[in-house]
Image (cartoon, rainbow, N blue to C red):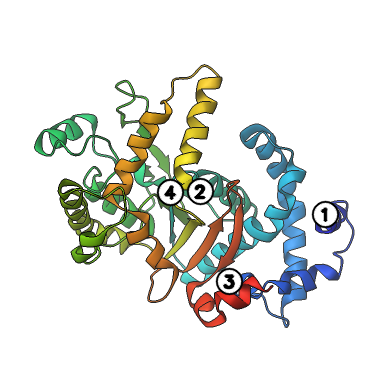
Amino acid sequence: MQTAIWLSQILAGALPDERLAQLMLADPLRAQAFDITAANVEQVVQKRSHLLRAVYPAFSEFCQTRLHLAPNQLLDTLWDFWLPLAMQLASSRQQLQRTLIQGILGGQGTGKTTLGAILTLILAHLGYRTVSLSLDDLYKTYHDRLALKQQDPRLIWRGPPGTHDIDLGLTVLKKLRQPIEQPIAIPRFDKSAYDGAGDRAQPELVDSIDIVLFEGWFVGVRPIDPAHFDTAPPPIETHDDREFARDINARLHEYLPLWSQLDALILLYPDDYRRSLAWRKDAERDMIAVGQSGMKDAEIEDFVKYFWRSLHPELFIKPLLTPPTWVDLVIEINPDHSPGSVYRPGDLASYGRDQRSEQ
């Protein structure tokens, strides 16, 4: 509550309260993740305060029109999370001296879309042009997926490895990484086409992009030792389940050239992967409540568990929390979808979870 008061005072033109600096150092893992030290914290507070004032009008409109929330409900999150993350991305782009390809890995309900939209908003105020590209935008065409399903009837839904046009993704990311003077066509996917089966939509033309936010439910995920499937957790239970999981795991090799285009990878990690099931049920109920079509609970369970069988979070995602890992930043996601703890895996390993819990 006190932080919100201080931030409101900043928005009104007052100087930052000196206790803000102390508060920013109180969580050592978050401070390390955002490169905040006792030596630079005062300067960071000043820069962040200036950016807060510049961004807030557009942020306020975004909250009211897109999130349908009062902006003061998210003021702390803006200060503690979205602003410093955007500033860090801007710094990384400046150091690279070329387009930054930032990967964002997160499952259902972790807030990938909202994160991308707010980062784009903030980065625009910092002078950087940003584009979001979803792994979903790289789906194969409707007719190609029909042919794929005939070859492998187990691919009953779009989404698992094998249902994407990897060459398209590579072409787009390489063009974005080393932009030319001509506009670049960003693929887009219409999930409503063909009664919900989905198909390619009109591409979006962009130019002079500084930062690409490439997000998806298995962006950056690499194949694991097939022996892990011998003792896999539910719902990988039958012989057919294990064979499906092994085959999907093998398909991940095809995605490695795509992941090689990433400059960094952020992991949005819920404290329990099973929350995605409850989150999906909530989302479907909300759609039904406003008159849209939505799946029933039993259909949702089949749908979500299908993806757990293909790439189980316990096997593919949880190991990325600790070294050796190619994840650069972990953002824990609370049950209410809000961002929680933020840390770099290497820092967490050296600091220790027990020490963090005492903070």
Asked whether the viewer can see residue 188, the reply is no
The residue under the point 28% across, 48% down is 309
Real-space Cα distance between discs 1 and 3? 24 Å
Q: Give the foreground label among 3 and 4.
A: 4
Mark 2 Cα shell of 10 Å, populated few (<14), some (14-19), many (≥20): many
**Residue pointed to by mark 2:** 110
Real-space Cα distance between discs 4 and 2? 6 Å
User: The disc labelled 2 sits on which kind of residue?
Assistant: Thr
**Which corner quadrant holds the C terminus?**
bottom right
**Which corner quadrant holds the N terminus?**
bottom right
Report helix, strand or loop for mark 2.
Answer: loop
Farthest-out residue, left: 151
Real-space Cα distance between discs 3 and 2? 19 Å
Measured as percent of width and height from the top left, residue 80 is found at 68, 60
**Residue pointed to by mark 4:** 107
**Marks 4 and 2 in Cβ contact (< 8 Å):** yes
- Mark 2 and mark 1 lie on one chain; the one further toward the N terminus is 1
**Residue pointed to by mark 3:** 33
